[in-house]
Amino acid sequence: LLAQNSRHLYGAAVLGLDKYLEQREKMQHQFADAKDKFFQRISQYFNTDNPAMVFTEDLKHVAYLCEDKDSDIELVVKMMKRFNQQNKELRFGTFVFGPVALRLFYHLKKPDVVLQLLKDQELDGFFDQFSSYQIAMDLLFKEQRYQDVLDIFNSMQQKQLYGTKYPRECVVLALGACYKLNTRESYDYALKLIQDARTVGALVLRKGLAFAAMLAVNHNEPKVAMELLALSAQLNYITIRNIRMMALSDLDRVDDVFLTLRSIIHQDVPVQSRVEQQVCQETVDKVDECLARLGDKEKTHIFEQMKRALRENNHISKQSLDELLCQPLLTRPTPRDRDVDRTAGSGVGGTYTSGYRMPLKGSSGVRYPVRHRQGLGDIDD
């Protein structure tokens, strides 16, 4: 199965884009025709040898009013750099602008600007939040810049923000990029990432495991795919179940595939739940290949009957497995919907088990422990 479709992995609500766009609309309505004069006034601050201090409110306004114009973007970047510099000097708690700025450039579809900003030394510490990297990586994924996704992930890992190298959502995006690249190098990278994360007790989410398992199937490693799938607590999830049947087919374990198919055909489930009981066409094709290889006429006949039953009961998915794998998460999962690692011993990421963040030494000095893990909702004002 080759990755064909390109899409983002996280919906607007998860990335905070919906709230950003709401606020942007309010701000544009509030300023109306005064926007150009406001930008001209702010621009004058940078025309002197000693630029004036950039106030939080002004940067907020510009971040919500900026349009897809070089002059607007240049002004935002200048303000961000000045704001970051003065924060180093002042050393007091301020509004976290990294995610807001990246939502702006996500909205404007500016992956090159995002890459440039994340590498800019003048903005060191400005984007030191998991949510900033999640937004940036999702934009790059959406733009099919998969190697850039991995490069940004690697640079984030070097920073070891909040005492971990393995923030869950960023790991999913990195594994998704590996799946899309579909090279032997990306396969090796994905395996090492999962192994390293699990070594320190970090949880790899089901979506990430599915990407890696499908990549293993693509590279003729069905045994590895089976081991990866066994790490997920959600074995009945549609992607997990289909990849498992594909891997079993590659291993010529057609009887095990038949067991799963019979459970789907004979299980009486409500219509609204039937999507979880669907079989992808790629899975059907894999089983056909397996049976052709085995040359077992009796089992081939049994499978023909199964295929008929699957079609008659609406169990064949209209979506490809690639589409299902890359379906964006539209809402933040509730705690009960989160994956549970079936084998990891000590809590998530080790450093999270106490509920404290590790101190972070960034451009604004040490960021002290907080009583909860930072989420995307924590950075909205």
Image (spheres, rainbow, N blue to C red):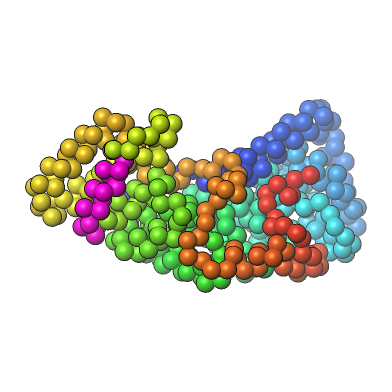
Query: For the point 37% across and 63% down, which residue is it?
Result: 227
Quick check: 61 left or right of 240? right
Query: For the point 35% across and 64% down, which residue is it?
Result: 224
Query: For the point 47% across and 42% down, which residue is it?
Result: 327
Q: Is residue 90 visible?
A: yes
Closer-to-camera residue (102/310): 310
Quick check: 234 left or right of 92? left
Query: For the point 52% across and 46% down, which residue is it?
Result: 9
Q: Which residues are magenta?
A: 251-264
Closer-to-camera residue (188/196): 196
Residue 51 appears in which quarter of the rendering?
bottom right
Where does the image place residue 238, in percent across and percent down from the top left?
39, 44
Residue 89 appears in which quarter of the rendering?
bottom right
Closer-to-camera residue (255/116): 255
Q: Is residue 152 visible?
A: no
Which image quarter is the C terminus in? top right
Total count of labels: 0
Quick check: 354 left or right of 307? right
State whether residue 55 is above or below residue 13: below
State whether residue 42 is above or below residue 26: below
Where does the image place residue 293, in percent across and percent down from the top left?
14, 54
State whether residue 313 is above or below residue 194: above
Closer-to-camera residue (200/25): 200
Where does the image place residue 115, in percent across and percent down from the top left?
61, 56
Where does the image place residue 45, in percent across and percent down from the top left?
88, 49
**Residue 361 included in the magenta stretch of the image:** no
- Type of secondary structure dominating the magenta stretch: helix
